[in-house]
Image (cartoon, helix red, strand yellow):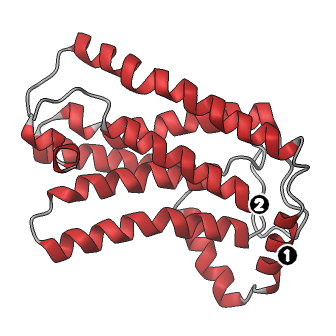
Amino acid sequence: MHAFWHRYQTDTSRPTAQQVRRDLARRVLLPAVVLWCVVVGLGLLITGPLGNLEGEYAVNEWFVQQRTPALDAVTTVLSAIGQTEFLIGACVLAIALTWWRTRQWWYAIVPGLAVAVQAVIFLSSSLVVGRERPDVDQLDHAPPTSSYPSGHTGAAAAFYLTLAMQAQRIERPVLRWLVTVLCVLVPVAVGVARAYRGMHSPTDVIVGFLNGATCAVLSWNYLRRTP
């Protein structure tokens, strides 16, 4: 496991363009196709034979009953940090800073790769499944994509979990654990916020997190490294 977390430290060799293309195809694109099938399959199951899981409506109603001005304000911020515009800017900044610090472009692009792959799976599966948003009062303007899976949660999981992996380079144990825990909790908080604000059902959030987390792992492991 140590070799996995520190794979870009134990092998700092510069890959060739051919190696990058080969590894991307084999270690990211092919697994991503399988992931897309899983996400779409679950979505069609939820909206078809399972009849949209009636118990989910009770969960959405419970969130509505918990609403307060303070929680509305907090979830507004949490929802915003999962937005596409925010994460694109955060990705550009993270890539630039990592590239500047390590001089390893093949390592620096990992967060951007994770978010990009997640976005392709999210957008295409959303079109195929086409699930309606929860039938409750919604606190945000609904984007043109369907409810399933949660794009905010998926993008946040892809980006912040990648940062959690990069945080394993931090030498101070307390700081390393603090940053890691925060990066793991952020996408969870984003998912809860999206359900609280009436934008997604629980399964939208769960599958969105699964999509983003898987893309983070695939992207972190995209390049062959020799410890």
110 or 168: nearer the viewer = 168
* Residue topped by disc 2: 201
Crowding near pointer 2: few (<14 within 10 Å), some, many (20+)? many
Amino acid type at circle 1 is Glu
Amino acid type at circle 2 is Ser
Q: Position of residue 227 (x, y in %)?
A: 10, 35
Q: Secondary structure at mark 2?
A: loop
Q: Secondary structure at mark 1?
A: helix
Q: Is residue 194 left or right of residue 56?
A: left
Q: Is residue 224 left or right of residue 119?
A: left
Q: Is residue 85 left or right of residue 140?
A: left
Q: Position of residue 225 (x, y in %)?
A: 17, 30
Q: Distance between the Cα atoms at labels 1 and 2?
A: 10 Å
* Residue topped by disc 1: 61
- Which residue is found at the position 82% from the left and 64% from the top? 56
Question: Residue 95 is drawn in which quadrant?
Answer: top left
- Which residue is found at the position 19% from the left and 74% from the top? 175
Q: Is residue 178 left or right of residue 183?
A: left
* Location of residue 41 with respect to 159 vertically, above or below: above
- Which residue is found at the position 49% from the left and 33% from the top? 117
Q: Position of residue 6 (x, y in %)?
A: 16, 47
N-term mark: 1 or 2 = 1
Question: Residue 120 is drawn in which quadrant?
Answer: top right
- Which residue is found at the position 76% from the left and 60% from the top? 201
Farthest residue in the top direction?
Answer: 18
Crowding near pointer 1: few (<14 within 10 Å), some, many (20+)? some
* Location of residue 117 with respect to 132 vertically, above or below: above
* Location of residue 21 with respect to 142 vertically, above or below: above
